[in-house]
Image (cartoon, helix red, strand yellow):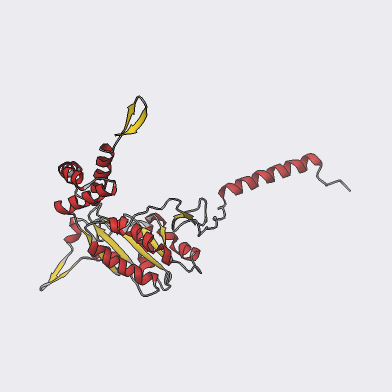
């Protein structure tokens, strides 16, 4: 009978090809998601895995912004409403998903950070998710299943085009699926748009008037339906000049400026806001940081060494 056993050269070639095939498979197969170390932080970011069918993971935020609610000026009523909802949630009571909308730089995202820092000791945790990753919400819910903490799913500066996949995923998560998300997870979102989507003049042309009643067109109804799924709406408004200057004074004091210097800086603060086209809390903070840095005591060189001015 002929000898059909492969010789050493043929076997080596087969093994080499097999090894090359395995390397190619490793390049396209998804990696195993990293295990979340829950003790490393009070805030996490959702990271999507690379490759077909890859699963995402929760990455601890190493340096959490230490914003305090007490530092947020001019929005006490908004803080009161959202903090009450958050307190209910942390205590295991019924609470609503929250949509924070309105003028830019007025403290929407800072409020969420302040709530996290205040209630972290009570078990509150935050998961920051990009709008494009909202389709992974079932994975996120699975990742926190069995945890005792209470989680805020945080989407900052949220807005959609109608064709984006995250739009429908969020609608389903809020109030459209036969299954619920989780009893220990709420969605807190911020947006400059109340209805989270761009609105066009032509859409208003479809509005019908029946007697004294106004009936919006289907496109408008569709856009309204998403924001209506949030149980709590909180609006933020542009600050008046006096409110803006109060915020400037607060932050100048935070940076170590006395009251007299803070008052003297008001005119410059107004010019700063005029150049930016906004009297927001963000602009007030940026001015205070700039002004305090420019007017801080600087080291003065002397023959004996260096001393503070």
Q: Can I make out residue 293 in this image?
A: yes
User: Number of numbered discs present?
Assistant: 0
Horizontal and vertical percent position of residue 67: 34, 54
Give above or below for 110 relative to 81: above
Frontmost residue, 260 versus 79: 260
- Quadrant (top left/top right/bottom left/bottom right) for the C terminus: top left
Give above or below for 262 relative to 226: above
Residue name at image x 36 percent, y 30 percent: 306
Horizontal and vertical percent position of residue 72: 27, 56
Frontmost residue, 44 versus 288: 288
Quadrant in the rendering for residue 7: top right
Q: Can I make out residue 222 in this image?
A: no
- Give the residue at the far front of this rendering: 304
- Give the residue at the far bottom of this rendering: 93
Frontmost residue, 211 versus 190: 190
Residue name at image x 26 percent, y 41 percent: 292
Horizontal and vertical percent position of residue 81: 27, 67
For this view, does 118 lie left or right of residue 262? Answer: right
Residue name at image x 39 percent, y 69 percent: 90
For this view, does 214 lie left or right of residue 37? Answer: left
Horizontal and vertical percent position of residue 3: 86, 46
For this view, does 108 lie left or right of residue 145? Answer: left
């Amino acid at each position: 009978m002929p000898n059909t056993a492969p010789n050493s050269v043929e076997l080596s070639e087969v093994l080499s090809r097999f090894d090359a095939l395995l390397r190619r498979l490793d390049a396209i197969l998804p990696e195993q998601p990293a295990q979340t170390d829950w003790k490393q932080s009070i805030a996490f970011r959702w990271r999507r895995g690379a490759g077909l069918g890859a699963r995402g993971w929760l990455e601890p935020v190493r340096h959490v912004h230490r914003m305090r609610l007490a530092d947020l000026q001019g929005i006490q009523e908004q803080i009161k409403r959202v903090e009450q909802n958050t307190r209910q949630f942390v205590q295991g009571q019924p609470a609503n998903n929250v949509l924070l909308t309105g003028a830019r730089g007025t403290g929407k995202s800072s409020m969420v950070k302040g709530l996290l820092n205040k209630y972290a000791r009570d078990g509150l945790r935050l998961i920051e998710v990009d709008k494009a990753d909202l389709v992974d919400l079932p994975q996120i819910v699975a990742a926190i299943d069995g945890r005792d903490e209470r989680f805020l799913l945080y989407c900052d500066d949220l807005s959609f085009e109608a064709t984006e996949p995250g739009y429908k995923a969020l609608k389903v998560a809020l109030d459209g699926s036969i299954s619920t998300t989780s009893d220990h997870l709420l969605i807190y979102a911020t947006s400059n748009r109340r209805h989270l989507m761009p609105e066009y003049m032509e859409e208003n042309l479809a509005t019908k008037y029946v007697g004294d009643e106004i009936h919006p067109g289907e496109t408008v109804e569709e856009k309204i339906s998403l924001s209506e799924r949030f149980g709590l709406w909180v609006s933020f408004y542009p600050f008046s000049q006096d409110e803006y200057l109060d915020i400037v004074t607060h932050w100048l004091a935070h940076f170590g400026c006395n009251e007299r210097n803070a008052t003297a800086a008001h005119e410059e603060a107004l010019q700063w806001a005029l150049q930016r086209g906004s009297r927001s809390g963000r602009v007030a903070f940026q001015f205070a940081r700039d002004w305090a840095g420019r007017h801080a005591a600087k080291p003065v060189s002397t023959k004996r060494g260096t001393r503070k001015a």
